[in-house]
Image (spheres, helix red, strand yellow):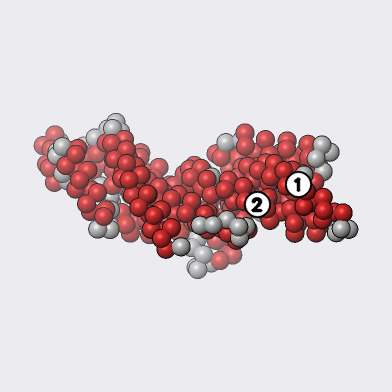
Amino acid sequence: MLRYVSRKLVQMLPVVFFVTVIVFALTNLLPGDPTVTILGEQATAEQRAAARVEYGLDQPAPLRYLTWISRVAQGDFGRSLRTREHVGEMLSARIPVTLQLAFLSILIAVAIGVPAGILAARFRGTLIDVVASFLAMSSVAVPYFWMGILLIMLFSLQLGWLPPSGHVRFFDDPVQNLRLMVLPSLTIGTAFAALVMRQTRASMLQVLSLDYIRTARAKGLSEIIVVLKHALRNALIPVVTVIGLQIGALLGGAVVTETVFALPGLGRMLVDGIFQRDFPVIQGAILFIVIAVFAVNLLTDFIYRVFDPRVKV
C-alpha cells in the first residue's frame, strides 16, 4: 500500500510542476497593471515604478517563477497584493467553506442520482425511465448560475423558506449554516446528480444482464435483494470513477455558485483575485484546486476496494 502511494506521489510531481508553470504564465498574461490594485488608479508613474521594484514585479518572469515556487515548496504562498494578507491564511479560512459545499453537493448527487439510476435501469423503457432520463438531461443543460437564480427566486423570494445568500460558520450556528448552504448545494448537486444517474443506469443495465444475476433470480431471491445486494455493489465501481473524475468540474461549479450566493469560499476568492489582478491569490487558489483533484483521484483508487475486494491497489 505504502509503495503504491509513494509511486503515485512521484508520478504526481511532474504534473504539478507543469501545472504551476502554466498557472504562473497565464496569470502574468492577464491584462492590466497589478500596481493599480496595490496603489489605486490615482497613483503616479513614479509610485507605480517604485511599487514594481518593491514587489519584484520588475524582475524577469522566469526569476519571479523560481522565487514563487521555492517559497511554495516551503509552505509560503506569498501575500495578497491588495490586502497584504498571507495567502496561506486566506486559503485556510476559505477552504472549509468550499469543502462543505462540495461534500453536501456530493451527498445530494448520490442521494438523487443513485436511486434514480437504479429505478431507470430496473424499469427500462417505461415511463419511470423516460422521466428520469429527461430530468437528467435537463439538469445537465442548465448552467450553474441560472439554476442558482431559479432556486433563489423559488425558495427565497416566492416561498420564503431559505435565505438567498450569505454565510455563517458551522460551529457558530449549525442550523443557520445548513440553511444557507442548502441552495448552493442544490445548485451543484442537481447537475452532478444527472451524471451520477446516467452512469448508475448504464452500469446497472450491464450488471443486471450478467449470468450471476439470472442465477440469483432463479434461486427465488426477491427482486429487492437481487438489485440492492447483488447488482448494486458491482455497478457502483464506474459510478465512483465518475464521481472522482468530476471533482474538478464540481470545484469549477463552486467558483460560479459561491459568487451567486456570496459564499466566502475558495471559488469566490479566485474570482476576486482575477478581477483585482491579485497574482499570489490566483496562483495559490488554483494550485490548491489542482492538488485537491489529485488527492481525490488517489482516494478513489482506494474506494474501489471497498466495493470490490478483487481490485488490487
Q: Position of residue 238 (x, y in %)?
A: 62, 47
In front: 311, or 152?
A: 311
Q: Position of residue 285 (x, y in %)?
A: 37, 48
Q: Position of residue 245 (x, y in %)?
A: 52, 45
First in sequence, mark 1 or 2: give its number.
1
Q: Is residue 42 visible?
A: yes
**Which is more foreground, mark 1 or mark 2?**
1
Total labels drawn = 2
Task: Categorize mark 1 by other alpha carbons within 10 Å: few (<14), some (14-19), many (20+).
Answer: few
> Which residue, given by chain and number where applicable, does mark 2 sit on?
236
Quadrant of residue 130 within the rendered picture: top right
Please report the residue visible at 82 percent of the width from the left and 53 percent of the height from the top: 215
In front: 81, or 279?
A: 279
3D distance between C-alphas at marks 1 and 2: 15 Å
Q: Position of residue 68 (x, y in %)?
A: 23, 48
Rendered position, 2 above or below 56: below
Rendered position, 80 above or below 170: above
In the rendered structure, which amino acid carries the disc numbered 2?
Leu
Q: Residue furthest bottom?
A: 171
Q: Secondary structure at mark 2?
A: helix
Q: Is residue 187 left or right of residue 280?
A: right
Task: Categorize mark 2 by other alpha carbons within 10 Å: few (<14), some (14-19), many (20+).
Answer: many
In front: 202, or 278?
A: 202
> Which residue, given by chain and number where applicable, does mark 1 sit on?
210
Q: Is residue 263 visible?
A: no
Please report the residue visible at 35 percent of the width from the left and 52 percent of the height from the top: 10
Say if mark 1 contacts mark 2, CB within 8 Å.
no
Q: Is residue 50 left or right of residue 148?
A: left
